[in-house]
Structures are given as C-alpha cells and as structure tokens.
Amino acid sequence: MARRILIAESVTPDQDRLTLTFENGHHVVRVRDEVLMSSRVSGSEEAMAAPALSDLAPGSDARVLIGGLGMGFTLRAVLEELGSAAQVHVSELLEPIIDWNHGPLGCHAGRPLDDPRVEILVGDVMTHLAAAVQAYDAIVLDIDNGPEAFTVAGNNRLYAPSGLAMVHAALRAGGVMVLWSAFRSGSFERRLRAAGFSATSVTVRARGAVAKGARHTLFRAKRLRA
C-alpha cells in the first residue's frame, strides 16, 4: 500500500475533512478520504479547453469563467488558447485549494495563477453566475463529480433547471459551456436542451494519451436563443 504523507488538511463547507497528501510522487486531494483529484490524472481536465473555445478565433481576447480550480490543469490549457488581453475568472469554493495551488500544487500546471489574465473569485460559482448577464464567451465547469455532486451537497443546484438558466443567462449569444463529469448522463443532456442549449457529450481518457484507466465525460452546451 502506498505511503501517504499528509501535507495539509482543512474542511469543506459541509464540514467534511479535506486533505492534501503526497503519494508515490503525486499529490492527491481527498474529501472524506475519497479521491477528489490527483496530479497523476489530468488528461480530461486539460481536454476541456478545446471544446469550450473551438468557436473562437485563435488567440482570442475572450472572457472565460472557470468554475473549479482543481490543480490548475484546465486553467493552464485555457490560457494557452487565449490572447494577451483575454480575461479568465476562476471561481473556487474551497479556499484551501487556492492556497495549495499557490504552494505545493502550483508546479503541476506551471503556476497558472501567476498569469496576469487570471482573477480568482473565492466562493460559490452559483453566486457569481447569478450576477453575470451575458458576460462570458465560454464557461468551463469542473466543480464536482458531475450531475450527482458528492463533494459539496449544494453543488447539485448547478445541474437543476434553475442553475442551467443562470449559465444560459451568463453566456453571450453563441457562447459555450463545457462541464466535466465522472460519468455519462442522457437525462442531463436533455436538461441542457430544455434550458436552451444545443448539447453533446464526448468521452475522454482521464490520463490523456495513456490508453488505459478511467474515462470521463465532457458535456458541451452552446447557447441557442438570445
């Protein structure tokens, strides 16, 4: 069994234990002793940038919202596609995750929080979405394990019709949301279409080019109506 070296610990808003450990050369974040993220697995997080930004011109100076910092892999991939005047807001509920990205986790994605195009928003992404009206060209969401949240119970609101309406309102005409999930969900795709999006999903490998291991799902939703 791999030895776990505890680096830091905290609690979630639901008062569940949140830990950062170092195991076999990789950092691991757990909630209630269940793996939430690992530096060993970043392929599906990095894959979110391409479908979110594919309708924009290369090097676009777009405005992008990322919900869920993770270990910074999605943020780094988004930044690499954008121009020098782009703006990227990163909403992260768990403040320890931000602190750990400024510290021991920062090396994994090349310390994207140091990029001047990035602004961190500490708090619930739903609160930010409620105040954003046609503010973003793309919204990239990786805030839990998918349409059935397990890290923070309140995250379930995002996947409900009211939450999807907030996302729709926050996107500019033709804007795109990409949402990470640990599993496929035909019912969630139907909810997206009912909320005014065209919706598709694709399965990606958790470890990128490595042809084995877990697979994850990316939902892509494009705003249809004004």
Image (spheres, rainbow, N blue to C red):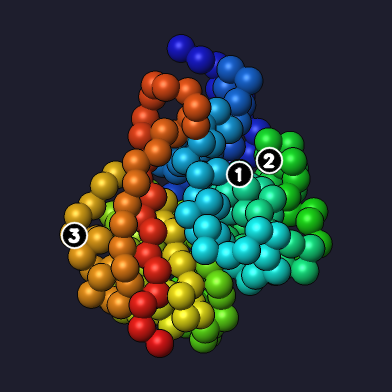
| Residue picked out by circle 1 | 73
The C terminus sits in image quarter = bottom left
Q: Is residue 5 above or below residue 68?
A: above
Which residue lies at the image location 34% right of the left edge and 41% below the top edge? 203
Query: Which residue occupies the foreground of this view, 97 or 40?
Result: 40
Say if mark 1 contacts mark 2, CB within 8 Å. Answer: yes
The image's mark for residue 194 is: none
Mark 2–mark 3 Cα distance, whole angstroms, equals: 33 Å
What is the secondary structure assignment of the residue under circle 3?
Answer: helix
Which residue lies at the image location 55% right of the left edge and 16% below the top edge? 3
Which residue lies at the image location 47% right of the left edge and 81% below the top edge? 173
| Residue picked out by circle 3 | 187
72 left or right, relative to 14: right
- Give the residue type that dot 3 points to: Ser
What is the secondary structure assignment of the residue under circle 1?
Answer: helix
Residue 168 seen in the current view: yes
Which tag, 2 or 3, sits closer to the chain's start? 2
Query: Which residue occupies the foreground of this view, 60 or 47?
Result: 60
Which tag, 1 or 2, sits closer to the chain's start? 1
What is the secondary structure assignment of the residue under circle 2?
Answer: helix
Dot 1, crowdedness within 10 Å: few (<14), some or many (≥20)?
Answer: many
- Give the residue type that dot 1 points to: Phe
- Give the residue type that dot 2 points to: Ala
Query: Which residue occupies the foreground of this view, 11 or 139?
Result: 139
32 left or right, relative to 9: left
Query: Which residue appears farthest toward the front when viewing the image?
Result: 57
Say if mark 3 contacts mark 1, CB within 8 Å. Answer: no
The image's mark for residue 109 is: 2
Which residue lies at the image location 29% right of the left edge and 44% below the top edge? 183
62 left or right, relative to 41: right
